DNA sequence: TTACTTTGCTTAATCGTTTAATTATTGAAT
DNA sequence: ATTCAATAATTAAACGATTAAGCAAAGTAA
């Protein structure tokens, strides 16, 4: 049998009303002037029966579920896995539980997840929004639901966000390559209007412009829905096509990874023939024969900030804030 | 304002009772003989007000939260991240949501997570149990709560489990190394009584015994709480210490990774001087200069099976089942 | 006409908790 | 003796949904 013990069971056992038990177990015995003797007996009974409050009933009554809904692209992607872990820890520290979902950059999956989380009355959302989900996010904001966007955000939507200063990241990475003497630097990026990607592209572009290398600007664009194999093939083809390319900067860790497979297949020498700067970090970067230079995101800071901003929103704070955290350019052998 | 729309709002708008609205929106209009005209008006009103059922209220009434509690070691560990993703997909497919927690192989964190999930009335648990949590699991079983253990299990506890056939995995991996001509094969494993680790060790040991290599049996034991740095240092020290070691088999992906860092630092030649077989798979294995041979776990099968077994339990099935899925030995250049 | 069925809807209990409002008792003060 | 305050408890509504049970009104059969 499900021996779920309720306040009623304790009340019956002690011979008092349910309300009294509730008061005592919520530490309101002073405020509500409950008799000393009764307090003792209630506490004893609760321990004896191993009472555990029913969070569901509490939520229904109180309106708060102490739950955060986390929506990422894919929890299996180490970038989001690590972020999820940090968010989890920070949430738990504050008495919250996390429910999560992966949307695969898919508008419909995203919608379904948001809907599910709404059914479940999450107190707030932390979302890495997929392309085209602008109105989904706007709808949440409209309903006055606490939302914090991470990794990317929509400039036109009044939602708080915690992201990387993406422009600065690729701007510096590109400058670094230029300083190393590379002249023909190309970028591999996803084809998406999402703000973080556009900013990363802009960082690359502006750095080249700054050094009068406008004619060198070239972006290998990968479609989101591409399979790994297709991505590798495309990068390989593009590299082969270009005669004078001498450096590549990647816009995400998955793209970096695909690029490394391509480069390995082509047998190009890094950093002599091709300079490389990766993104996000990945253990694989360490084992590439020329350990990779890469743009490192401050994941712990991003995760913690996201949770704290969300909790502020949940607690009534209504100002919208945008955090653009700074990257760290980890320079090693590949550039 | 929180414009949460309830059945009551619809009922008021249409001018009928709450019950009728509930019947219609749950598709019981036939069974409950609701008038055609009213059905139409209720459905319209529901759409117009954008009604979304309150899952919390449903749960309280119905007793089921349609939620699965997932407890792993660390969601940031790609092994568990990938598994979580598969579990998520399978859960969603069945109308369930996943709440997760990382216990870091810590008894107390594990206990706190289980408690939290109990408060939240999860319908069932999928747990990769930490060492020493035997009684926590036993207590859940005692309370007749649906539980499925993954990755490891406790032989003495009557809980269903979905694991790898760990013995077979390392047994074959070791045989493979022997067949390749390696004579002095050592293992790197975590020091834990947990069943999966003991089985992996046993596989290694039995294979050596089978080939009369009893004297070669040696296990480099790593403490769970060791930092990455300490682990690498220890492995490095142990390898240096042994004069004739010529192959290493690792018991997890994190250990493999640490080992690769050590081996890189030592400058040992793989596979000539040292044969290697890793565990679980990791992109980094592909970029090690001698792409790693490794024991691959059938993650999709494990995740799906775990969810399905759990759903069976939730739906009243009471038989305890143990699945030991088979590995795939992915042989490449390191052995 | 009377009795019974069918149709279409409402009432009210329930899940477990919180909490405002109320009641009853005792003690102290006037 | 009467009033007021303090103490210690209970009652009942509310959160939002589900669902068994009940009740009219209309239709059908004898």
Image (cartoon, coloured by chain):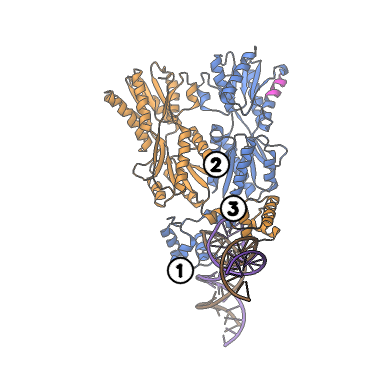
Chain colours: A orange, B blue, C purple, D brown
Indicate which disc, 3 or 1, sits on the residue closer to the N terminus.
1
Parent chain of label 2: A
Main secondary structure along the magenta-highlighted residues:
helix
As drawn, is A4 to the left or to the right of B96? right
Image location (x, y in percent) of residue A37: 69, 56
Is label 1 in a helix, a strand or a loop? loop
CA distance separating discs 2 and 3: 23 Å
Image location (x, y in percent) of residue A221: 36, 31
Q: Same chain for the residues at labels 2 and 3, yes or no?
A: no
As drawn, is B266 to the left or to the right of A248? right
CA distance separating discs 3 and 1: 30 Å
For mark 2, what is the residue? Answer: A92
As drawn, is B4 to the left or to the right of B107? left
Marks 2 & 3, CB-CB < 8 Å contact? no
Does the stretch in magenta take in A99? no
Q: Quadrant of residue B158?
A: top right
Give the quadrant of the C terminus of chain A.
top left
Circle 2: is it few (<14), some (14-19), or many (20+) Cα within 10 Å? some
Image location (x, y in percent) of residue B88: 54, 42
For mark 3, what is the residue? Answer: B64
For mark 1, what is the residue? Answer: B15
Q: Which residues are magenta?
A: B204-211
Parent chain of label 1: B
CA distance separating discs 1 and 2: 44 Å
Name the residue located 56 percent from the left edge and 19 percent from the top edge. B262
Q: Residue B280 bears which disc, if any?
A: none
Parent chain of label 3: B
Q: Is residue A240 visible?
A: no
């Amino acid at each position: 049998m499900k021996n779920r013990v309720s306040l009623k069971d304790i009340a019956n056992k002690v011979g008092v009303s349910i309300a009294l038990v509730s008061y005592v177990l919520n530490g309101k015995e002073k405020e509500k002037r409950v008799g000393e003797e009764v307090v003792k007996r209630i506490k004893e009974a609760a321990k004896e029966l191993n009472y555990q409050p029913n969070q569901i009933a509490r939520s229904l009554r109180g309106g708060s579920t102490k739950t955060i809904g986390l929506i990422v692209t894919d929890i299996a992607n180490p970038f989001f896995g690590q972020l999820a872990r940090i968010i989890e820890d920070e949430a738990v520290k504050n008495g919250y539980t996390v429910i999560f979902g992966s949307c695969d950059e898919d508008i419909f999956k995203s919608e379904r997840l948001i809907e599910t989380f709404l059914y479940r009355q999450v107190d707030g959302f932390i979302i890495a929004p997929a392309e085209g989900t602008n109105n989904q996010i706007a709808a949440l904001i409209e309903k006055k639901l606490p939302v914090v966007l991470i990794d990317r955000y929509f400039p036109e939507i009044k939602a708080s966000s915690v992201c990387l200063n993406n422009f600065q990241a690729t701007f510096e990475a590109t400058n670094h390559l230029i300083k190393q003497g590379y002249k023909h630097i190309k970028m591999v990026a996803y084809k998406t209007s999402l703000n973080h990607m556009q900013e990363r592209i802009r960082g690359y572009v502006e750095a080249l412009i700054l050094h009068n290398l406008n004619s060198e600007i070239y972006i290998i664009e990968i479609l989101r829905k591409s399979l790994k194999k297709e991505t590798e093939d495309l990068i390989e083809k593009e590299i082969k096509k270009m005669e004078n390319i001498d450096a590549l900067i990647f816009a995400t860790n998955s793209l970096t990874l695909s690029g490394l497979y391509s480069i390995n297949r082509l047998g190009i020498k890094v950093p002599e023939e091709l300079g490389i700067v990766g993104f996000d970090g990945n253990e694989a970067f360490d084992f590439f024969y020329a350990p990779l230079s890469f743009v490192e995101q401050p994941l712990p800071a991003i995760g913690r900030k996201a949770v704290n901003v969300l909790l502020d929103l949940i607690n009534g704070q209504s100002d919208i804030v945008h955090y653009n955290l700074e990257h760290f350019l980890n320079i090693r052998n590949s550039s």
